[in-house]
Amino acid sequence: MHHNLYEFYGYRVACTAPDEAQAVVTRLFGAPLAPGGTAPWPDAATVRLTVEVTGTGRETVPPPYFPPRWDTLDEVVIDTGGSTAAITPARHTIDLTLSRADLDDPIVWGRWLVEKAFLILTLRSDRHYGLHAGALSVEGRAALVTADSGVGKSTFTAWGLLHGAHFAGEDAMMRHLDDPEGRFWGYPRVGYLDPALIKSRPELAEARTAPVPARDKHRLEWPASFASRLKPAVRPRALLILTREHQEVRPVSVEAALELCRSDFSAGKQDPGVLARVEDDLREQLFGMTVLEFGLSSDLDANHARLTAVLHG
């Protein structure tokens, strides 16, 4: 068995896994933290992840976006048929059982199990919350990027990375109330992109990809050549709310932005006091940002140029 520490979405992850699962662990987390290292800050929450491999031959079935009663059960189970993740929010533990047939399927162990397990832990916690957002940084100035599904958030953030920006994630950003530096944490190792975009970029020719069932996207693991620009966290200067209803950049009030994000940060928060603390924290973060509705055009280069102007204007 291997016992190592990793960083994932701003959590310190104490992972125990057998030899045959090590390739999966490396693809998920990258290199382990240095011995004795603390990440991402000394008092960061630790998630204990245990991986087991079984020989089950059950058919793989896409799970629901959230399992039934995910926001109230003491143990939440995500079941894909052959593989499962059992999440105990109160103990910050994840027990991952992988079928040998799924070891080469990053949709199962990545998108459906581990990525979703950490989202559930965050949403169920009284010291963390999540936003449906990505993040990137252009020449040292960062933006959170949110949008309704289908608007183009993933393409917008990926295009930035492909054109020299630093990239911190494209779908979920986590905020830890105990983080002393006010950061938002993402998962920068992967993107979910239109396969036509992937095919059009020579620098992605060797990237590991997998189609997402019932979606027009592929899960892509960024090649090693991008490693220096994959950053797990940002201190955002701006919040951009992407839209295709116009092609302008319009200011948005903090209170309006809070309402737009309410379904994100309130998810899983059963205690009104916890929800009030979370809302106060996000309000405080937004008061330190420029908050804008950012109209997208069909010209990806022009959108990126406008992003640069917004962050450095």
Image (cartoon, rainbow, N blue to C red):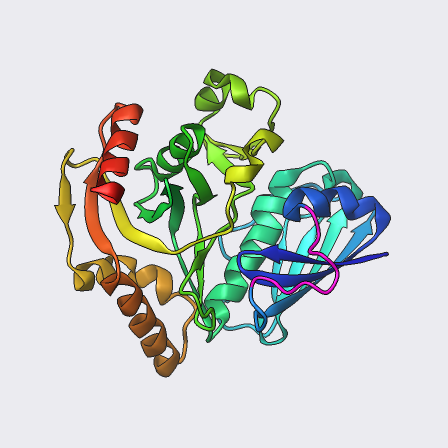
Q: Which of 88 and 125 is in front in this view?
A: 125
Q: Is the magenta stretch mostly helix, strand or loop?
A: loop
Q: Which of 129 and 62 is in front in this view?
A: 129
Q: Where is residue 155 in the image (x, y as percent from the top left)?
A: 38, 32
Report whether residue 57 is seen.
Answer: no
Segment tinted magenta in the rendering: 31-40
The total number of labels drawn is 0
Q: Which residue is situated farthest in the bottom direction here? A: 273
Nearer the observer, 88 or 237: 237
Image quadrant containing the C terminus: top left
Q: In this view, does 14 lie above or below 17?
A: below
Q: In this view, does 275 lie to the left or right of 54?
A: left
Q: Is residue 266 above or below residue 6?
A: below
Residue 66 is a magenta residue: no
Q: Which residue is drawn at 74% across and 54% down?
A: 97
Q: Is residue 39 a member of the stretch shown in magenta?
A: yes
